Image: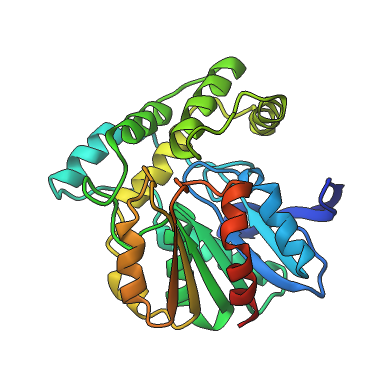
Amino acid sequence: MSEICKTSLMDYQEGYSENNGIKIFYRDYGPKDATPVLLVHGLGAQLVHWPEHLIDFLIENNYRPITFDNRDSGLSTRFKKKPSIVLGYLRYFFRLPIKSEYTLNDMARDGINILDHLNINQAHIIGTSMGGMISQIICAKYPQRVKTFTLIASTASVPGPLNGATKEVRDMMVSRSQTTDPTMDEVYQRELKWVGLIGMEGKELDTPKFREDTINNFNRIKDVKDGFGYARQLTAILSSKNRIKKVKSIKAKTLLIHGEQDPVLNVKNSYLMNELIPNSDLIVIPNMRHLIEEEILDQFKDKLKIHLKT
């Protein structure tokens, strides 16, 4: 199933890839003769949360960005269990087993299924945050499908008190995972607080454009009335094992990008991955937190352009 749509960026094609009853919604910006780039997003994010300036940058440099909704987000398949994140964190901190409805390995396979669906043999991989964790598995498990790897604000370890989120960030994540049937205004106020917490310090957020984008993103999934998809994705992260061995096995040329002030995943994670991945370079950006604002992209886009050409 697919349909042609119009965006301010260019024409794109949308549709579903399906495997074992799991439907993953994707957006293919084309053109088909350009070099594909599969973008894998983070916890709770829809494909529309990729910043337009990054998609524009890729298109302008003759790349074919392909974005998708991870399972349990956006328009992709939703699962049914209602996990307790508080209990999940307690079990994690006490090193007790955590049961998850699916794994990060399953989510990595979703990305490969999209490439299969689009008849793409090989693509550049860009992953951020949880999407970076998923992308590590793609690069380690399916190396023949990977041209280069760009890993943004992520970790090879399971996030914990020393390498993961600050208490304020964790509190907001727990709250979001338990939210049921929020109003548009509640979602907007939550997004203002969340982006203010993990985005660039001092950046003006309460703008007509931010409100319009938040409303559009809310309406895109208006039939989803709870945050349990977010909770299930977070449970998949907490239940995963450290990917140290997998990351060590990555052969693709890798560019690591991390914010020095990241409150979600400490920058020490990327220093470690830079040591683990043989063919890797690290860029640490002083005023970056966890998001890729245009001012942040401007600081690494030239190096990204060179990296994608290797």
Residue 26 image-quadrant placement: bottom right
Asked if 298 appears above or below 63 in the picture, the reply is: above
Specify the quadrant that holds the C terminus.
bottom right
Q: Nearer the viewer, residue 184 or 310?
A: 310
Horizontal side of 243 relative to 188 (left or right) equals left
Asked if 133 appears above or below 121 in the picture, the reply is: above
The location of residue 40, given as percent across then percent down, is 55, 58
The location of residue 122, given as percent across then percent down, is 63, 78
> Residue placed at 32% from the left, 35% from the top?
170
The location of residue 82, given as percent across then percent down, is 38, 33
Q: How is the image coloured?
A: rainbow
**Count of marks placed on residues:** 0
Can residue 11 be seen here? yes
Q: Nearer the viewer, residue 206 or 108?
A: 206
Asked if 91 appears above or below 241 in the picture, the reply is: above
Q: Nearer the viewer, residue 168 or 222?
A: 168
Q: Nearer the viewer, residue 308 or 104?
A: 308
Horizontal side of 11 relative to 88 (left or right) equals right
The location of residue 61, given as percent across then percent down, is 75, 68
Horizontal side of 124 relative to 190 (left or right) equals right
Residue 232 image-quadrant placement: top left
Residue 210 image-quadrant placement: top right
Horizontal side of 158 relative to 97 (left or right) equals right
Can residue 26 be seen here? no
> Residue placed at 50% from the left, 39% from the top?
199
Specify the quadrant that holds the N terminus.
bottom right
> Residue placed at 60% from the left, 60% from the top?
39
